[in-house]
């Protein structure tokens, strides 16, 4: 992986270089995310569902109805 990142950072393609620099900068977080058994997937799913309900309700009815729908969806 180190050889690939080094080659990508020295690449003539700006987008590839930018991607490689980002991977290098976030390397510790990326390795932690793929090696540890913990996940925040459940929380992300709930947040995604709440955002979906909010988008569906945009401009309709009242905040109280949105609040009830969010609480029922969670």
Image: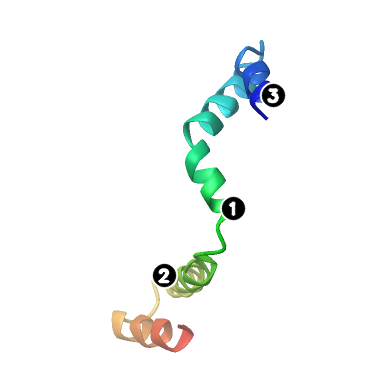
Rendered-image quadrant of the C terminus: bottom left
Query: Which one is in front in this view, the residue at disc 3 or the one at disc 2?
Result: 3
Instruction: Report x, y in % for residue 56.
Output: 49, 73
Q: For numbered disc 2, what is the local secondary structure?
A: loop
On the image, numbered disc 3 is attached to which residue?
4
Which dot marks residue 72? Answer: none
Instruction: Report x, y in % for residue 34.
Output: 60, 52
Instruction: Report x, y in % for residue 20.
Output: 59, 26
**On the picture, is 16 further left or further right than 25?**
right
Structural distance between the alpha carbons of marks 1 and 2: 39 Å
On the image, numbered disc 2 is attached to which residue?
58
Q: How is the image coloured?
A: rainbow
Q: Nearer the viewer, residue 33 or 55?
A: 33
- The structure residue drawn at horizontal position 41% and vertical position 81%, both measured from the top left corner, is 70
- Badge 3: residue crowd in 10 Å (few <14, some 14–19, many ≥20): few
**On the picture, is 58 further left or further right than 13?**
left
| Quarter of image, res 64 | bottom left
Instruction: Report x, y in % for residue 46.
Output: 48, 74
Rendered-image quadrant of the N terminus: top right
| Quarter of image, res 50 | bottom left
First in residue order: circle 1 vs circle 2: 1
Which dot marks residue 35? Answer: 1
Query: Which one is in front in this view, the residue at disc 1 or the one at disc 2?
Result: 1
Assess whether mark 2 and mark 3 are in contact (beta carbons under 8 angstroms): no
Q: For numbered disc 1, what is the local secondary structure?
A: helix
């Amino acid at each position: 992986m180190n050889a690939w990142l080094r080659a990508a950072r020295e690449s003539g393609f700006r987008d590839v270089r930018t991607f490689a620099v980002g991977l290098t900068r976030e390397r510790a977080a990326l390795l932690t995310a793929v090696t540890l058994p913990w996940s925040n997937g459940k929380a992300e799913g709930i947040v995604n569902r709440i955002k979906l309900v909010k988008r569906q309700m945009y401009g309709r009815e009242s905040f109280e109805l949105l609040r009830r729908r969010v609480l029922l969806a969670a």
